[in-house]
Structure formats: structure tokens, C-alpha cells
Amino acid sequence: MTFTPNSTGAPFFDLLGDRKQSIKAVSIDMSGGYEKAIRASVPDAEVCFDPFHVVRLGQRAVDQVRRDEWNAHDRSTTKTGKWIKGTRWSLLKSPDKQSIPQLALLGEVARANKPMFRAFLLKEELRLLYHLEDPALAPAHLDAWLAWASRSRLQPFVKLARTIRRHRAGILAAIRLGLSNGRLEGLNSRIRLISHRSFGFHSAAPLIALVYLCCSGIVIDLPR
């Protein structure tokens, strides 16, 4: 079941009855509504914050730094402003997924705009938290990142550091337990795509049938 920030999730847990006591950990994003529902219904379960959403917060922070620089250089009315606007994907994508022109543009950023390049490095260091060879190094890596972000003089990352510090235990729990919403997020995206194909249906039944047809046989393997 997917919880929305405006729902408590209580009816779902009520349906589980005594079985909810067997829940040891729950993976969610950082919405306060989600966490409140978990704490109220399964207080002994360990809350884990989904890696994808943590990294996405880093991407949003680096994009905000880029927009701040764009605004500071008169947006697209100047040559520098137009150049900053075009750096978006070089800053957001990880280097291993960038094209040669995007990597070349990233090199220009390193030389021409130190705040944006520092924001890119902060975003990448946060992403690398989830790719450490030894997960036992995650607490030290995260603490070093928090210290760097807090003194970065980049307001979006200073703000993000405060958010991540409040959720530190759940972030590290997700790494330790190997929990992620990735498969379920992918399934939700696929269902949303199917729903676009169902425009014109006269009831929900054909849509539900199409979801079962296209998404059958999916098995989510849980960590032991």
C-alpha cells in the first residue's frame, strides 16, 4: 500500500491486525506523515529512509544552487546566464551516465563557477554514500558529508544538512538493512504509464485488468 502525506495509513495497519507485530522495518521517504503513521501503528519497527529520495534531495539542492546562480547573472538575458541554464543536466546526472559533451561542460563548470561545482561534488558525495564497498563506513562517510555541507556556504545544502541530520538514523538503517523502495517505485511508475493508456475507458475495471495483465508475475524479494 502507498501512503500519501495526507493519509495516516491507520486503516491499512488495522487490516493487518496482530500480523503487524511481525513488521521489523519499514522503508519510506522523509514525509512527516509517513513516519507519524509508522510510529503510531508499529512503534517497534525500525524506520528506514529510502535511498532514492535522499539522493533526489541532493539533486534538488544542486539545482537550486544553479538557479540561484542563474538569477544572480540576470537569467537568460546575459551570455553567462544562458550558459548557466544549459549546465543543468551536467550537474544533475552522475558522471558515468553523462555524454562526452556533458562531461566537457562539467569541466567548464569546474573552471568557471566554483559554487555550482562545489554543489555538484556535494551531490555526488551524498550519492556515493550508497555505493561504498564496505557499508560499515557509511556512518563516518555521512558525518563527513554533513560537516562539509554545513560549512559549504551554499544555503540549499546547509538546509539539506539540517534535514539529513534529523533523519540520520533512518538513512543509516536503510543502508545497514539493505532496504529500498526502488522496485515499488518502478512499479508505481509503470502503473501511472498504464493509466495514461487507459483514457477513454468507461470504468475502472478495464484499467485494473490492464494493470494485472502488464504487471503480473512481479515478485518483490525482501531482505532476510
Image: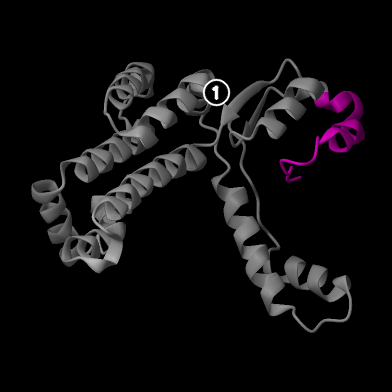
Q: Which contiguous range is marked in magenta?
A: 1-20
Image-quadrant location for residue 118: top left
Quadrant in which the N terminus appears: top right
Report the residue that reaches farthest toward the left: 111
Secondary structure under badge 1?
Answer: helix
Asked if residue 12 lies in the magenta stretch, the reply is yes
In the rendered image, the vertical position of residue 31 relative to residue 91, given as above or below: above
Side of 106 where 158 appears, left or right: right
Q: Is residue 99 left or right of residue 142?
A: left
Q: In the displayed structure, would residue 66 be above or below residue 212?
A: above
Return the x and y of residue 217 as percentages of the image width and height.
68, 59
Q: Total marks drawn?
A: 1
Residue 11, given in percent of the width and then of the height, sits at 89, 37
The answer to whether residue 216 is above or below residue 179 is below
Q: Quadrant of the C terminus?
A: top right
Q: Residue at x 82, y 81 (%)?
A: 201
In the figure, residue 139 lies in which quadrant?
top left
Residue 19: percent from left, percent from top: 85, 27
Q: Quadrant of residue 56?
A: top left
In percent of the image, x 68 and y 78: which residue is there? 197
Residue 107 relative to residue 195: left or right: left
| 4 vs 74, nearest the viewer | 74
Question: Residue at (69%, 22%) from the top-left corner?
Answer: 24
Colouring convention used in this rendered image of the protein: one colour
In the rendered image, which residue does mark 1 sit on? 170
